[in-house]
Amino acid sequence: MMSDIISTDAKEWIDMDPLPGSLTPWLCESSLTDLRIRISGIPRPDVIRNDRGKKRQHAVEETYPGEGQMTQHRVYERLSRFVNLDTTPFNGDDDRSKRGSIDGGALAQDT
């Protein structure tokens, strides 16, 4: 069983096959049972600024309208392919869920 959380960028995690425009199949999709991951680099125009109105230090801005929503969709599409997970990929026990990425079930930007 894996105990460390792996960090990756959303674009790497999605792993699109450019020709058909779909996700590249991974051999482990039906066999992986434990996944602990933090996925960053998801544009979130709704959390670009902090509570004081200052731009967040690690905010990822969209390069085109809807990019953040499309990226989130593809990330969850990739996660849905792991059909035999015994553990959930997110645990809400640490504070990174409020600042980092997809971790703890939250989608937020670094502060």
Image (cartoon, rainbow, N blue to C red):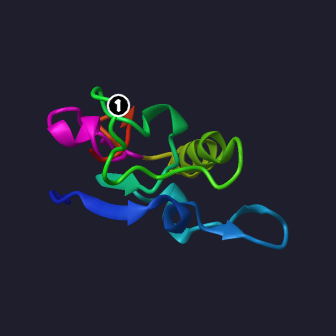
Residue plotted at (65% across, 55% down): 63
Q: Nearer the viewer, residue 18 or 27?
A: 18
Task: Note whether 92 is above or below 60 in the view shown.
Answer: above
Magenta stretch contains residue 73: no
> Which residue position holds label 1?
53
Q: Nearer the viewer, residue 91 or 25?
A: 91
Q: Is residue 47 visible?
A: yes
Where is residue 3 shown, x and y percent of the image? 15, 57
In the image as oriented, which residue stretches furthest toward the right?
A: 20
The amino acid sitting under disc 1 is Gly
| Mark 1 crowdedness (10 Å alpha carbons): few <14, some 14-19, many ≥20 | few
Quarter of the image holding residue 80? top right
Task: Note whether 10 is above or below 44 in the view shown.
Answer: below
Quarter of the image holding residue 14? bottom right
Quadrant location, the C terminus: top left
Where is residue 41 shown, x and y percent of the image? 45, 56
Left or right, 36 with reference to 82:
left
Q: How many marks?
A: 1
Residue plotted at (52% across, 56% down): 30
Quarter of the image holding residue 39? bottom left
Q: Nearer the viewer, residue 92 or 43?
A: 43
Where is residue 105 shown, x and y percent of the image? 36, 33
In the image as oriented, which residue stretches furthest toward the top?
A: 51
Q: Is residue 24 visible?
A: no
Magenta part of the chain: 85-101
Task: Note whether 18 is above or below 31 in the view shown.
Answer: below
Q: Look at the magenta stretch and give its main secondary structure.
A: loop
Where is residue 55 shown, x and y percent of the image? 37, 43
| Mark 1: secondary structure | loop
Q: Nearer the viewer, residue 92 or 83?
A: 92
